[in-house]
Amino acid sequence: MAIESYENLIADLKKLRLPAMAEMLDSYVKQAASTSMSYMDFLSGLVSEEVRHKERRGVESRMKSARFPVIKSLDDFDYTFQPSINREKLDELASLRFIDNKENALLLGPPGVGKTHLATGLGVRACESGYKVLFTTLNDMISALMASMADNSFPSKLRTFVLPSLLIIDEVGYLPVSKEGANFLFQVVSRRYETGSIILTSNKSFADWGEILGDGVIASAVLDRLLHHATVFNIRGESYRLREKKKELVKEEKKEVTGHF
């Protein structure tokens, strides 16, 4: 009878979509029998297992829907290689209060200095903290919105970029943008203004945005909304990728020298 009751309980827990409690029940039953665990501790322990399980699943789901090209952590960033970064300002961003305040962060600098790493690291931390995040390059976002015009799904696709708590727009300035593309960017930024946060990376200074977007008026309107509530980083330094390449070349040269002897 005890076995039947146990199996029924397992079945009920699964029906209630409490898989962690179902999985850990046997372990807790054995622990309770051997330690005289109280009913309260028994139930509290099982519920905590389920809460942790759902939190992990939630983070995994948010990370997947964020569409990060590569997972990067703020803890893995080499700050000693980029001393131009204001750690105090970055730590403030890492608290994620800027998301609650509907503020933006703009990371500017030449290719390879860690802009995308920092943007992704902040996005990952946001996912871990329960925020909905979406990562996209500017070109991919424009292409998606452009394609949606063909099948009349533009309003729905636009919401894809408007609804997340945090939108990360990477690689602004790397590829030329048509006037229609610039208009799409303006619509996204305008709809998110004071309603959702944006992290944006660019290899161009603000003075060049008129040329990037092909329209000085749209560029001014986009920047006006982005910068109204924003933290700006101007990152200067050597490219990480060039540094690693140089290390490889040095190793190869040492091998060649050693081989001669």
Image (cartoon, grey):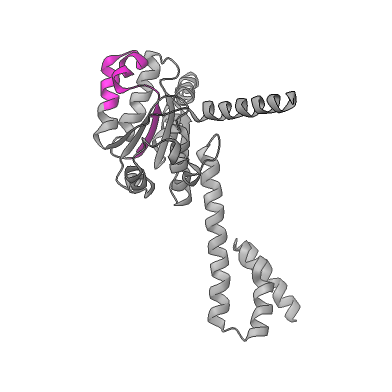
Q: Position of residue 259 (x, y in %)?
A: 74, 26
Q: Residue at x 47, y 40 (%)?
A: 78
Percent x, y for residue 253? 65, 24
Compared to residue 138, the image places residue 196 above or below, namely below
Give the magenta part as a residue range: 196-223
Could you say which quadrant of the image residue 197 lies in? Answer: top left
Q: Is residue 37 left or right of residue 137?
A: right
Percent across and percent down for residue 153 are 47, 26
Say if the magenta span includes residue 45.
no
Residue 29 locus on image (x, y percent): 67, 78
User: 87 above or below 135?
Assistant: below
Number of numbered tags placed on the structure image = 0
Q: Residue at x 57, y 60 (%)?
A: 53
Residue most extreme to the bottom: 36
Vertical order, 151 against 235 (above or below) = above
Q: Could you tell me which residue is drawn at 53 percent across and 44 percent down?
A: 63
The residue nearer to you, when weighing 206 against 251, is: 251
Q: Is residue 197 magenta?
A: yes
> Is residue 191 found left or right of 154 in the rendered image?
left
The one nearer the camera, 260 or 95, is: 260
- Report the quarter where the C terminus lies: top right
Q: Residue furthest front?
A: 261
Q: Answer with left or right where residue 231 lies relative to residue 6.
A: left
Quadrant in the picture for the N terminus: bottom right
In the rendered view, tell whether residue 216 sits above or below residue 32: above
